[in-house]
Image (cartoon, rainbow, N blue to C red):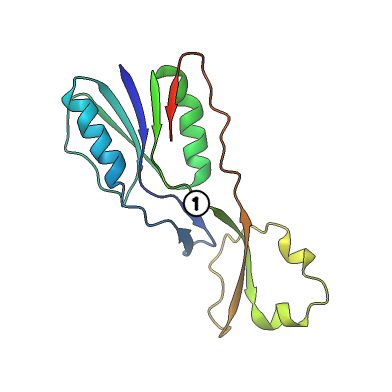
Amino acid sequence: MKILITSGGTSQPIDSVRSVTNRSTGQLGTFVARQFLKNGHEVTLVTTQTAIKPEDHPALTLVLVETVSDVQEILERLVPVHDALIHAMAISDYDPIRMVPFAEVAQADDLTPFLEKEDQIQKISSKSDVQVLFLQKHLKSFPWSRPGTLIFC
């Protein structure tokens, strides 16, 4: 069987140098991958740079991701060509919308404008003593389906 496993924790960028990261170790996904490899299955492990990874194996393919969007994109491509998906990855619960100095938030009569996503391409200034980070909850379900594919979460 061709087994697709996700492992580790995603990271969502705040700006070009900061991120909100789930520090999941990837230990569970690596354990599961080793078991399937021992039993003669082909394994594709979608994981993060910092996660624990199994030893090299001829039947193992590693795919490195960072963000929730990366995971979605990769799984949309890989789920259809695998027999089973074991989703052990810790997907980020929140996506940073904007980080602003506290003084700017304190002066605002309406916080709604802060809830509009702003791509922080450049590094956010470190001059402010206090920053406010606005986060938006991620939708945790992904529309992966293929008749006959087993999905374990």
User: Which residue is more in the foreground, 22 or 121?
Assistant: 22
Q: Amino acid at mark 1?
A: Ser
Count of marks placed on residues: 1
Nearer the observer, 45 or 1: 1
| 122 w.r.t. 27: above or below | below
Q: Which residue is denoted by mark 1 in the rendering?
A: 92
Q: Position of residue 109 (x, y in %)?
A: 83, 77
Q: Is residue 77 left or right of residue 88?
A: right
- Name the quadrant containing residue 62: top left
Q: Is residue 126 above or below residue 75?
A: below
Please identify the residue farthest to the front as the structure is shown. 152
Q: Nearer the viewer, residue 82 or 35?
A: 35
Task: Indicate the quadrant containing the N terminus: top left, top right, bottom left or bottom right.
Answer: top left
Q: Is residue 108 above or below residue 23?
A: below
The structure residue drawn at horizontal position 42% and vertical position 56%, both measured from the top left corner, is: 22
Q: Position of residue 115 (x, y in %)?
A: 72, 61
Residue at the spot 69% in from the left edge and 83% down from the top edge: 103
Look at the numbered disc 1 and give the secondary structure of its residue: loop
Along the line of sight, the residue nearer the viewer: 139 or 59: 139
Q: Toward which corner of the image does residue 95 lie, by quadrant?
A: bottom right
Q: Residue at x 47, y 30 (%)?
A: 75
The quarter of the rendered structure image containing the C terminus is top left
Hey, which residue is sitting farthest top in the picture? 148
